[in-house]
Structures are given as structure tokens and as C-alpha cells.
Image: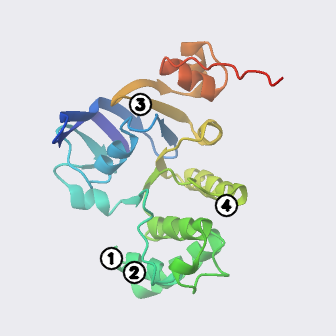
């Protein structure tokens, strides 16, 4: 469902000149699979997701998403993905239900089908109590649920999620995790970025670690453990980045 081949993105910066945000990145995500992208800030995770969502154009390389090339067929790609960006993509003056209706209409859904799907999404994400409240009056967790709702209202086969649980409390983060697992059971292809190692270890079938724009490793947890000799994903991650974790000094 997602096949990335030599994806490269170079930005021009006035002070630093050419900045290579992604450098020959390749990986794939299959239907019914969850793949997580891990990396420190500035590693290129968000750039990779934006390229796959056709928000940005690659400098070199390409990717095929749901059977369509992101360079040659961006509109076809957009119609088959749900993209959750870091800024949520919400309108504060609209309610969650109105946001679902707006994005559903943008996706070309028929009124009756959109009404059924909106009700289903509201129930699925536990939004019934505030579905008709303006979004700018909601908590961060409530807004994130609304953002995920607008991402999936058209029931796309591919989900691209940029830190879906960022800043959420434990109950809301668990709800998002359960939604991702349910989407996998439904055969969807899911690619997401996260800084939460426990979340990645729990959810992901495979993990891609990116550092300084390059893929350091791709594989299952067993693959990563075999490659590094470490057990916990946190330790594996630091080892791949050549970062030594200093022990905390005992308090007197």
C-alpha cells in the first residue's frame, strides 16, 4: 500500500544553504500493517509523512501510495489517504460534527452516507458528549479526537498519522491506540510517527528509525533486538543513534 523508493528532499535555507532533510529513504508498509517512524527532532520524520501525503514534492525519488505515484498522481493519492498533521487541521468555530461534514463533503461523500459515517465516527471516538460544541472550547484530547475523526471520515485505506498521541492524557492516548489497532484489523495500512517508545513497541509490526535524514534500520522488534543486542526500544533507539545513556547519580 505504501512503497517508498529513494525519497530525498532538499530545502534551501538562507543561512545554511542546501539542507538535505531526507536522503535516499526507502521502506514499505503493507495492508493490515502498522509501521512506526522513529527519530529525534529534525530527523526527517514529518518531512517524510508530508511527502507521502503530497503536501511537499520530493527532490528525488518517489513513492507509490494505494497504487498511485505521489509525483505523477497526487490527487489520486489524496483521495485514498487520511493524513493527520501536527497542527490537527481543525477550524475552531466549527463543532466536531460540522468538521466531519465539511471534510466528508470535500472527499465527495453523498449526504446520506456521510451522515451514517459521521455518526459512526462520533461513536467510535467517544465524541457524543461534545460533538456539537465549538472546537475552540474543547480540551486538547477532545480536539485530537476530532482531528482523527476528520482524518478517517471518508474511510480511506491508508492512514498517515504524525504523532497522533502527542500531548494526550493516558485515557485518550489509550483510545487512540485502540483505534489504530482496530484500523489494522480492518485491513488498513497505517504509517505513523511518534516519540513515545512504549507506544511504538506496543503498536508496531515494524519500525523505521531515521536519523539525519537517513534510514538507520527497518524491521520488527526482534530484528532490532538482534541488530543491537538491546531489549527495550528506548535502548535500541539510543544505540542506533550512537547515544550513550548516562546513569542518573544517586541522591545523597
Nearer to us of marks 4 and 2 is: 4
Please tell me the numbered disc located at residue 102.
Answer: 2
Is residue 13 depicted above or below 165 in this figure?
Answer: above
Q: Position of residue 81 (x, y in %)?
A: 38, 58
N-terminal of the two: label 1 or label 3? 1
Q: What secondary structure is found at the residue carrying circle 4? A: helix
- The residue depicted at 40 percent of the width and 58 percent of the height is 83
Q: Position of residue 42 (x, y in %)?
A: 38, 38
Q: CA distance from mark 1 to mark 2?
A: 6 Å
Whether residue 7 is visible to the viewer of this picture, yes or no, is: no
Quadrant for the N terminus, please. top left
First in sequence: mark 2 or mark 3? Answer: 2
Secondary structure under tag 1 reads: helix
**Which residue is painted at 63% across and 81% down in the image?**
130
Mark 2 surroundings: few (<14), some (14-19) or many (≥20) residues within 10 A: some
- State which mark lies toward you, 2 or 3: 3
In-front residue for pair 84/4: 84
Alpha carbon of mark 1 to alpha carbon of mark 3: how far? Answer: 33 Å
Whether the residues at callouts 1 and 2 have beta carbons within 8 Å, the answer is: yes
Looking at the rendered structure, the secondary structure element under dot 2 is helix
36 and 249: which one is in front? 249
Of the numbered discs in the image, which one, if any, rests on residue 106? 1
Query: Horizontal placement of 197 versus 56: left or right?
Result: right
Instruction: Check if mark 2's residue and mark 3's residue have beta carbons within 8 Å.
Output: no
- Residue identifier under label 3: 210
Decide which of tag 4 and tag 2 comes sooner along the chain: 2
CB atoms of marks 3 and 4 within 8 Å? no
Amino acid at each position: 500500500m505504501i512503497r517508498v523508493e529513494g525519497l530525498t528532499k532538499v530545502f534551501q535555507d538562507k543561512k545554511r544553504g542546501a539542507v538535505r532533510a531526507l536522503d535516499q529513504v526507502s521502506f514499505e508498509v503493507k495492508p493490515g500493517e502498522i509501521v512506526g517512524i522513529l527519530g529525534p527532532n529534525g530527523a526527517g520524520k514529518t518531512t517524510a509523512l508530508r511527502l507521502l501525503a503530497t503536501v511537499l514534492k520530493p527532490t528525488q525519488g518517489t513513492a507509490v501510495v494505494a497504487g498511485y505515484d505521489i509525483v505523477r498522481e497526487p490527487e489520486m493519492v489524496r483521495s485514498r489517504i487520511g493524513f493527520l498533521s501536527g497542527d490537527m487541521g481543525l477550524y475552531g468555530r466549527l463543532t466536531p460534527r460540522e468538521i466531519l461534514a465539511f471534510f466528508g463533503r470535500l472527499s465527495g461523500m453523498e449526504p446520506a452516507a456521510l451522515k451514517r459515517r459521521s455518526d459512526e465516527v462520533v461513536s467510535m471516538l467517544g465524541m457524543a458528549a461534545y460533538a456539537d460544541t465549538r472546537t475552540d472550547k474543547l480540551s486538547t484530547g477532545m480536539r485530537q479526537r476530532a482531528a482523527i475523526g476528520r482524518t478517517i471520515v471518508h474511510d480511506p485505506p491508508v492512514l498517515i498519522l504524525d504523532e497522533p498521541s502527542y500531548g494526550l492524557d493516558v485515557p485518550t492516548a489509550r483510545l487512540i491506540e485502540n483505534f489504530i489497532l482496530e484500523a489494522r484489523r480492518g485491513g488498513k495500512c497505517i504509517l505513523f510517527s511518534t516519540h513515545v517508545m512504549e507506544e511504538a513497541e506496543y503498536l508496531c509490526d515494524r519500525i523505521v528509525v531515521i536519523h539525519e535524514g537517513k534510514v538507520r534500520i527497518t524491521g520488527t522488534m526482534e530484528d532490532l533486538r538482534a541488530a543491537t543486542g538491546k531489549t527495550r526500544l528506548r535502548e535500541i533507539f539510543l544505540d542506533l543513534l550512537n547515544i550513550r545513556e548516562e546513569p542518573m547519580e544517586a541522591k545523597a
